[in-house]
Amino acid sequence: MATISEFLAARAGLLKGYGSALSGSIGRLVFSLAYFVLLANSLSIAEFGIFATASATGVVLSRIFAFGFVSPLYRIATVKPQLVGVYAAGFLAFGLVSLPVVALIAWMVHGAIFAANMAIGAFALVVVSEVLLWRLAETVIIVNNGMGRFGRAAILVILGTFFRALAALFFAYAGAASLDAWAWYYLGANAVSLGVAALFFYPGHRLRFAPRLYGRRLMDSFAVSGSEVLFYLQMELDKLLVLAMGGPQIAGIYAIVMRLVDLTAVPIRVFTMMLIQAMMRSPEMLRRAWLKLGIEAGIFSVSVAALLVLSGVLHVYPGLLGDNVAQIAPIIGFALLVPAFRNLVEYQAELLYARGQTVLRAINLALLAGAKAVLLIALMSVVSGATPLLAWLNAVFAALYLISAALTYAALRRPAKPL
């Protein structure tokens, strides 16, 4: 008993930090679910699919913003918090420079994928919400987490999701249930989140522009930007391909299922964040094979159990999350293993980031994005209908996990890069 007490006492700070971060994720989970239910049942299934795909596109584009300089900012917040103001100024400067690049790519993506289904004005509002408004608010969360202020970061996470849920509530009762109208509500919710983040949650360090300090961090920034774009591209590529090849209705069904899948990752991402911070200070902490296997087994088990419980609840109470979700409830279980393999790929990518192996991470993610595109295009060429698509997705994500594991653990045998 004394040994257990000593173990817990030695890790009291870590456990407290995890509890604070997890509380934010639980709060986010509650409001995310409310937001999802309100929106998924206010828009048609097809419109929800289009919006989810546009939002996913905005998330990918947001990783180009500031050309990845959020990575040096996070590292500085973790190891040298007194320089946060200097690197925050650099982040904002690089953000301004990156905006024309983001705008050009967004315009090209709209023309290639969204032109037939979504007005460019509504698409632009969604992209601005993700790239400029939420990404800046998210950066404040990242800085607070880096500085160990997990409670403050958790509160801001909850507030950000709360404002979106509140916007969805107003939208549901406004009687203007169109995608074009929702884009304005979404913009407003993210603008409020950014205002609250800037006024009440920024650590208070005075912004100081010091270009001489940024040069040696640029390679890491560009590598992280590239790898983050590739990471979110391979995470969200399925939505784009389903919309392009299956049409809005199938895309809507797929988006609802994947949104439910994404909710299973909330507690796992908190654990991963804490582990990554520990690895940034001690890069060789996962040298033992049994520890690697145990962590992956835990992620797999929690992910499968979460979707299994959710699928079971919706089987008994199909209307629990609204009429639109009720139509899809019977087929959610067909994607049972998808969250497990998806969460494991995300976890493995973060291991390389923690060790400073950002170039290898970018290469691995490029290979995964290519593999995912090939597998999904092949699958959708021979499969029609939402049910067989979800069933075969288990095999697609299992293959991506095996590729990721082979690439990641080969890279981990190399020495870690100094941060």
Image: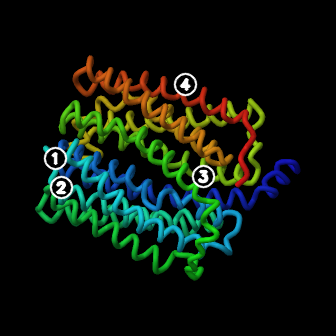
Alpha carbon distance from label 4 to label 1:
36 Å
Q: Which residue is mark 4?
A: 402
Whether residues under marks 1 and 3 lie with C-beta atoms below 8 angstroms apart, the answer is no
Residue occupying the far right of the picture:
2
Query: In this orientation, which residue lies closer to the viewer: 200 or 154?
Result: 200
The image shows residue 106, relative to residue 257, as above or below, that is below
Crowdedness near tag 1: few (<14), some (14–19) or many (≥20) residues, C-alpha within 10 Å? some
Question: Where residue 63 sits: x, y (%)?
Answer: 44, 54
Q: Which residue is mark 1?
A: 115
Q: Compare marks 1 and 3 and give the one earlier in the sequence.
A: 1
Evaluate whether residue 308 shows in this view: no
Whether residues under marks 4 and 1 lie with C-beta atoms below 8 angstroms apart, the answer is no
Q: Which residue is mark 2?
A: 120
Crowdedness near tag 2: few (<14), some (14–19) or many (≥20) residues, C-alpha within 10 Å? some
Residue occupying the far top of the picture:
382
The image shows residue 217, relative to residue 402, as above or below, that is below
Kind of residue sitting beneath label 4: Leu
Alpha carbon distance from label 2 to label 3:
36 Å
Question: Where residue 252 sits: x, y (%)?
Answer: 23, 40
Q: Which residue is mark 3?
A: 273
Q: Residue at x 37, y 25 (%)?
A: 374
